[in-house]
C-alpha cells in the first residue's frame, strides 16, 4: 500500500550552475525518482526510442494535446515543439513516485499554474558568482565565444526569476548542494497533505480512545 502521494520536483537554473548534474545525482541517490520524458515534434535521432528519450509526435498530434489540456508545459524551440505530457506524470504521482523536471523558468511557471500545482516543489539553483558561472561554461570547452555570450545573456533573465521558487540553493559545492536537495525532498515527502491514509489512521486512533 502506498504511504504517500508523489511530488513534482522542478529544478531550474541558468546554464552552467549545475542543474543537470544535480538532477542526475538525485536520481542516482534514489532510482525510484522518475525523470519526466518530454514530447517533441522533431524527428528521432539514431538510437532514440519513443517513450525513452522523448515521446515523438507529429505537430498535429502535439497541438491537439495542448488544445485538450494534456500538456503541463510546452514551448517552441528552433522550429520544433517540446512539452511535458500530463498523463504519465499524474500516474507516477498517484503511485507515490516523485517526478523530476529539469526545465527553465518558463516551463516551471506553466507547471506551477497547472492542475498539478499543489504537487509541485520548485527549486532554483544559483551560481556563487557570475564570474564562476562563466568559468564553468568555458571549462566545458564545447561552445564558441558567441554561444557563451548568448548563454550569459540568457542567464541574466533566468536569474531574475529566482524569487518565484519555493527554495533557492547557491551551488558553491556540488556535494553540499546535493545534500541540501536530498533534505528538501525528504522533508517535502513528509508533508501532511502527501501522506495517504493519515486521516483514516487518526480516526482509528480516536476510535480506540472511545473503546477504552
Image: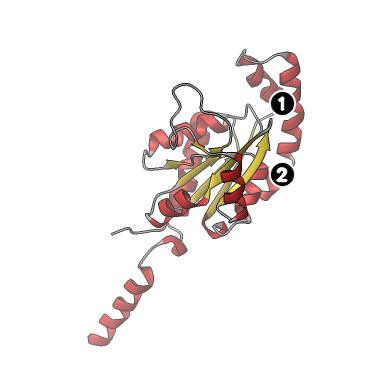
Residues 137 and 169: in front is: 137
Q: Quadrant of residue 107?
A: top right
**What is the secondary structure assignment of the residue under circle 1?**
helix
Is 181 left, or right, of 202 in this rendering?
right
Q: Which residue is mark 2?
A: 161
Mark 2 or mark 1: whose residue is earlier in sequence: 1
Q: How is the image coloured?
A: secondary structure
Measured in 3D between alpha carbons, the distance from the residue under mark 2 to the one under mark 1, in whole angstroms, is 16 Å
Q: Give the residue drawn at x 27%, y 87%.
A: 210
Is 139 left, or right, of 9 in this rendering?
right
Residues 203 and 33: in front is: 33
Q: Quadrant of residue 41?
A: top right
Q: Quadrant of residue 10?
A: top right
Neighbourhood count class around disc 1 (C-alpha, 10 Å): few under 14, some 14–19, many 20 upward: some
Is 38 left, or right, of 93 in this rendering?
right
**What is the secondary structure assignment of the residue under circle 2?**
loop
Whether 51 is drawn above or below 151: the answer is below
Q: Can residue 47 be seen from the camera position used here?
A: yes
Q: Where residue 87 is drawn, which disc sits there?
A: none
Q: Residue 58's x, y, as percent?
A: 56, 39
Q: Residue 160's x, y, as percent?
A: 75, 41
Neighbourhood count class around disc 2 (C-alpha, 10 Å): few under 14, some 14–19, many 20 upward: some
Whether 202 is drawn above or below 138: the answer is below
Q: Residue 27's x, y, as percent?
A: 42, 36
Q: Can residue 166 be seen from the camera position used here?
A: no
Residues 45 and 181: in front is: 45
Residues 50 and 131: in front is: 50
Q: Which residue is mark 1?
A: 151
Whether 14 is drawn above or below 163: the answer is above
> Dividing the image into 4 quarters, which one contains the C terminus?
bottom left
Amino acid at each position: 500500500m502506498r504511504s504517500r502521494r508523489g511530488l513534482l520536483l522542478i529544478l531550474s537554473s541558468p546554464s552552467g550552475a549545475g542543474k543537470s548534474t544535480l538532477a542526475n545525482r538525485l536520481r542516482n541517490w534514489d532510482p525510484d525518482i522518475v525523470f519526466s520524458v518530454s514530447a517533441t515534434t522533431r524527428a528521432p535521432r539514431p538510437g532514440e526510442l519513443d517513450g525513452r528519450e522523448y515521446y515523438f509526435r507529429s505537430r498535429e498530434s502535439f497541438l491537439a494535446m495542448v488544445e485538450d489540456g494534456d500538456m503541463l508545459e510546452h514551448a517552441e524551440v528552433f522550429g520544433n515543439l517540446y512539452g511535458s505530457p500530463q498523463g504519465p506524470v499524474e500516474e507516477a504521482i498517484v503511485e507515490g513516485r516523485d517526478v523530476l523536471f529539469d526545465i527553465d523558468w518558463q516551463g516551471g511557471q506553466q507547471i506551477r499554474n497547472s492542475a498539478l500545482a499543489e504537487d509541485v516543489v520548485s527549486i532554483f539553483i544559483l551560481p556563487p558568482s557570475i564570474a564562476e558561472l562563466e568559468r564553468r561554461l568555458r571549462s566545458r570547452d564545447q561552445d564558441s565565444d558567441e554561444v557563451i555570450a548568448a548563454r550569459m545573456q540568457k542567464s541574466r533573465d533566468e536569474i531574475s526569476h529566482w524569487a518565484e521558487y519555493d527554495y533557492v540553493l547557491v551551488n558553491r559545492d556540488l556535494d553540499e548542494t546535493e545534500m541540501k536537495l536530498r533534505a528538501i525532498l525528504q522533508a517535502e515527502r513528509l508533508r501532511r497533505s502527501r501522506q495517504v491514509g493519515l486521516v483514516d489512521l487518526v480516526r482509528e486512533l480516536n476510535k480506540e480512545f472511545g473503546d477504552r
